[in-house]
Amino acid sequence: MDLSSINWLLLLASLMVASTPILLAGLGELVVERAGVLNLGVEGMMITGAVCGFAIGFETGSAVWGFAAAAGAGAALSLVFGVLTQVLMSNQVATGLALTLFGLGLSSLIGQGYIGERGVNVPDVPLGPLADLPVIGPILFRHDAVVYLSLLLCLAIWLFLYRSRAGLVLRSVGESAQAAHALGTKVVRIRLTAIAFGGACAGLGGAYISLVRVPQWTDGMTAGAGWIALALVVFASWRPWRLLLGAYLFGGLTVLQLNLQAAGVALPVEYLSMAPYILTILVLVIISSGRGRAALGAPAALGRSFHAAA
Amino acid sequence: MAVIALERRPAPSAVWRWATPPLAVLLTMLAGGAMFAALGQDPLIAIRTIFWDPLFAEQFASYARPQLLVKAGPLILIAIGLAMGFRAGVWNIGAEGQYIVGAICGAAAGLALYPADTRLILPLMALAGALGGWAWAMIPALLKTRFGTNEILVSLLLVYVAEQLVAAMALGPLRNPEGGGFPGSRNLARWESSANPELIAGTGMHWGVVTAFIAVIFAYVIFTRHLAGFQIRLMGEAPRAARFGGVRPGRLVILCFGVSGALAGLAGLFEVTGPAGQLNIDFGAGYGFTAIIVAFLGRLHPIGILLAGLLMALTYIGGELAQLMLGLPAAAIQAFQGMLLFFLLGVDVFTNYRLRLGRRRIA
């Protein structure tokens, strides 16, 4: 193995690209869980976003339309989950799983005609003179618009949750739906909005994989990214900035693993490909073993159905 | 303003409990028919090809009927184990991984003894398969009980690890040395000591199906007659009461994961020695995930799971037939199965709530 063959600058530059899908999906799920809803369908919404984004991008030739379609498809699918869990009070774990299973089938159904096609080009947006800075320029300031958007989204979600009244209301719904209801809050409406937002974010994250990271459509291409995003939310203790940190840490390690594969480590590719999943499990263990610190951050009403008893 | 309101029933309705699965199937047929129509198929023909022709059309039945048990066997076996956990609120959703690892361990145990010729090899492999699945399931279970790690995420992430592991095995240690460099193990179905053959010609019955039927009977007895079954239910429906009643949650987590892992491992082993024949890169076929649908569709009840397993097996076979006859894409069936779970969870509202036509009140 030749470690010097790895271009560390390129590695750091691709870190942000590798992290963006899970960051987007994770941010969406964070808001959903803060509203007290556990949506395990992230993987299904991501893959549906990936195929819709790719297909619409391919048909219209516009990446913007592709991303918009992906967000729309993710939100639409998430609302199926929303209606089932919020209006028909179904079990959130089971419904989330159903969403993932359905999304995987639906996506490969939609994607049949697009296998092997080349996707639209998503241009990089160098940020003016910043992009010309040595070392830092290529790493931070020469990415496509979605990367910057994901960072802005992180900031916006932080502002929303901790600096706005609406955010406070959303968090109160997540802590105690009954109490929020008693105060006159429209619990179901708020939760549905949060779920749709989460779905749109997951769709965007999926489309980022099929339009920028790969860029191609293959069946099951999200390969567990949705589950990793769910794990990241736990890792982040339901806080946006820690989610950003976690996503970049994780993205960095993924990129390193890919580079190690390319550098020809004397280990079969399959074992290296396990690394992201094993790593996620290890991180979950470390976080949850810290004397219930993860439990401190979890919204108290997470995963519980709410029915306004008349 | 007159509105339709939902009112919680004092106790879940027994009638609706068993009426919802057929209703969900019916609704799925309608929605699925619409989906097939959108794909340019005649919905009636598509539905008939999937649900009727495999069993009753002369030209297909001789092939398709035995397939029913071949496909239903692993689904039922896995779903029985999962139902036990789901009843207790223990979410093992990584049965696919346990299924794969069971097949790897079982196949490895058998291949280590190749080409010995004794009747004991298949039982030994079954033991190794069950142990493999059990061990794989112990990872999320122990992490849950020792560290409080979320078992849903861990068990699911381990599926991806298992998929990579089976690829590594099929390309590495377990590759057939006489296979001319192709990936995949020796054919276990053609080696007499390890073969899991059709026991009664023309039925599709193999040892895995027999095991599945035995599991159904055992689960029935445990759920209805045994203290463990009662504790599982108590834990799922009233965790606090269960704790006061002396139920130890950690032990139930270990028990539920252990049983479901071992059963999934067995299912994997019987698949690799029978219908699949060899361990290859693409060994995982999604039975572990479909079994989740089977468990819910069967209302987490052994007899229900038996019926649901047969129905889901039928959609697999019918789906293949529709692919062959109508050119319907394979993915359509997957979407169809997912839809079924959606409808089931949706109409289940009638089990716990009743509709009331009334005036809107300030709650």
Image: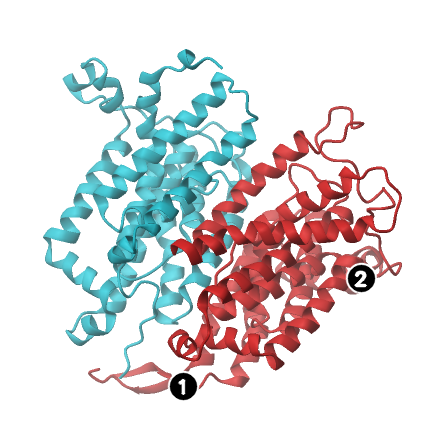
Query: Residues at marks 2 and 1, common chain?
Result: yes
Residue B174 image label: none
Residue B9 image label: 1
Colour in which the image shows chain A: cyan
Quadrant in the picture for residue A24: top left
Name the residue at 54% across, 20% down.
A266
Secondary structure beneath dot 2 equals loop
First-in-chain label (2 vs 1): 1
**Residue type, mark 2 in image:** Ala
Tell me which chain appears red: B
Work out which quarter of the rendered image holds the C terminus of chain A and state it: bottom left
Instruction: Name the residue that disc number 2 marks.
Output: B57
**Residue type, mark 1 in image:** Arg
Name the residue at 57% across, 54% down.
B95
Residue A192 appears at what percent x and percent y? 29, 62
Of the two numbered discs 2 and 1 in the rendering, the one whose residue sits closer to the viewer: 1
Q: CA distance from mark 2 to mark 1?
A: 44 Å
Q: Is residue B150 visible?
A: no
